[in-house]
Image (cartoon, rainbow, N blue to C red):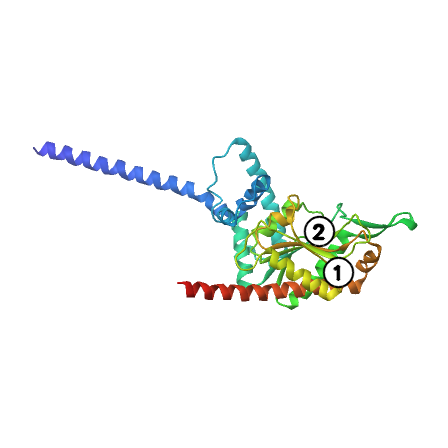
Amino acid sequence: MKGKMALFYVLLSLMFFLFGTACLWQFAKNREDTEPAAETLADSSESLQDQGQGKMPGQQEMQQTKAGGGAQGEATSEDAAQEEAAKEETSQKSDAVAEELPSDEALYDEEEAVVSETLATLIRQEHDKIVVLDPGHGGDDLGYTATDKDQKDQILLTEKEFALDVALRTKALLEKEDIFVIMTREGDTGEDLKQRVDRANVLPADFFVSIHLSMKDDSMLHGMSVIYNDQFYSRGYGSSDLAEQLLQSVTDKTLEAPLGIFPCEEEEEEVRLIVMPGVRLEMGCISNRQEVRLLGRDDYRQKVAEGICEGIRLAFENRQTEQTKQNTEDDTDE
Ligand SMILES: [Zn+2]
């Protein structure tokens, strides 16, 4: 009888041991599986690229991308290669972002995703109004140019130079209004469009404003227009509201003609892929001789910048009013 009991106890403890080991193994495996979730922000840039090739998903889908990049379908070897490339890009991108922000050694983790997330949170903690300014073109990409036919086609004006100058003037004005500005370029550099967009998307900005000029077939036509991102829905205050406000403020300041606001075309990626209210300002027609003269003048550029600054300032104000109104409506509904 005693022998049988002993055998029973031995078997029982053996079972407990095996069960314990299995639990530990399962626990370790789960940890491994959940770890990639930390990379969410880094992955979001990659997912945005994927989205660029297909249809643009709704905002909800995009939010999911931001919140859980780890939960994407099975990866083929091609996906793996893309992922590698995207990671590399993200790492360069984060370095670039880091350069522009108050640096703190302790913040920089091995995982660039954690860096972005931490920096993003930090910026948000310090600033409640954040705008991304994107001066169009740069480097080898001049954008549109105006040349003087009488002077051996000497270049009178390039879009890239105009855009950067106006963006820097706008930045200085916005900072006086306590609005934090992130620039996609601050010098004559030609960063890839997609990289600019990804960089802006990782950061928690309120508005994205890209600065350009336009070229019309009709050389008599002059004036300002704004292209907006109609793919991104934002409750209360969206891209078209921002576009209207900016066009109004800029034309009020410069007294130039408003040509209207238009939804962006398929190929206008810097506006289409942005996941915040975003617009592209076309601050004049480089195809019009009189306007080229204006666009080259310092005082006129300053006026354009003042108009953009005023438009952004009012956009924040109007958004606030709109949100308060909606919150009150929600409260009364409940
Ligand atoms: Zn342009």
* Proximity of marks 1 and 2: CB atoms separated by less than 8 Å: no
Left or right: 216, with 89 as reference point? right
86 above or below 97? above
Left or right: 100, with 114 as reference point? right
- The N terminus appears in which quarter of the rendering? top left
Q: Residue at x 38, y 39 (%)?
A: 29
Q: Could you tell me residue 18's position as x and y percent?
A: 27, 35
In the rendered structure, which disc, 1 or 2, sits on the residue that comes first in sequence? 2
Which structural element holds mark 1? loop
| Residue with the mark numbered 1 | 257
Left or right: 254, with 108 as reference point? right
Quadrant of res 47: top right
Q: Could you tell me residue 26's position as x and y percent?
A: 34, 39
- The C terminus appears in which quarter of the rendering? bottom left
| Residue with the mark numbered 2 | 136
Q: Is residue 127 visible in this depiction of the protein?
A: no
Amino acid type, mark 2: Gly
Q: Could you tell me residue 214's position as x and y percent?
A: 75, 51
303 above or below 112? below
Q: Residues within 10 Å of mark 1 (few under 14, many from 20)?
A: some
Q: Residue at x 46, y 45 (%)?
A: 37
Closer to the camera in the image, 72 or 104: 72
Q: Is ligand 1 less than 8 Å from the beta carbon at label 2?
A: yes
